[in-house]
Amino acid sequence: MPEIQRIGRLVGRRGISEAKRRAGVDEATRRLLLGFVVPTWTGAGLADWACHRATDIEHTAGRRESVIHAAMMTQAGIPALLGLLFEVNAGVLATTLAALGSHQVTAVWDVAYAENRRKVTATEQHVHGLLEQVPVMATAFLFAVHWDQARALLPRSPERPRFKLERKRKPLSRPYLAVLFAAITGLTAVPYGNELWRCQQAAQEAKAPPR
């Protein structure tokens, strides 16, 4: 009996240690997502906008390319918002995977459309590399942290998939969300909105009859 109790205590300690290790890995992954991946995506997006402006996008590739950019921001933004505000389950992971696939396809279309209409510099190509890989990184991190629900997407999985949207049990702090949304608005939404407006104005001016 004492031997059984000793083994039970040992297994219990190992179980607690393993639980702490997993919790530490999960927390470190979340910190990477929030403290590195999201700021990198925002910064790369702003750098890409600066490249577009430097090559006079409104008078070269024009409005269609700007609309493509808006589509890619939407494809990346929807899963990002879901992951920030809701519990990450099979439904959120499936949406993230679908958005990633469509974002990669749209990125190829974007470059194919732009390269013959304006100068795509080496700097912009490097920025494009970041913008294409950051969503891949974010998706990989989400799948790693929520592996039980990731497995649930597979056929004959022992896990039960959850698809209902649920508010986070441990929501992110309001100050962090406020800073994050302010950064996304100021560094992404406003610049690209300005780009689309400039392209629209240039298209209207081109259609206007000469005076």
Image (tube, rainbow, N blue to C red):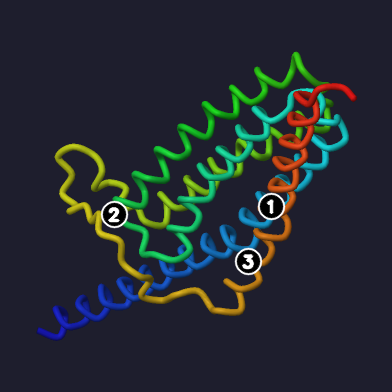
Give the x, y percent position of residue 77: 53, 50
Q: Is residue 122 left or right of residue 76?
A: right
At horizontal 53% and vertical 40% (from top left) the residue drawn is 136
- Residue assigned mark 3: 180
Give the x, y percent position of residue 76: 53, 45
Q: Is residue 12 left or right of residue 203?
A: left
How many other residues sit within 10 Å of disc 1, few (<14), some (14-19) or many (≥20)? many
Q: Is residue 12 left or right of residue 60?
A: left
Q: Quadrant of residue 107?
A: top right
Camera-nearest residue between 106 and 192: 192
Label ID, residue 152: none
Is 140 rendered above or below residue 166? Answer: above
N-terminal-most mark, 1 or 2: 2
Mark 3 to mark 1 CA distance (whole Å): 11 Å
What amino acid is found at the position of numbered circle 2 in the picture?
Asp
Q: Quadrant of residue 82?
A: bottom left
- Residue assigned mark 2: 148
Quarter of the image that includes the C terminus: top right
Mark 1 to mark 2 CA distance (whole Å): 33 Å
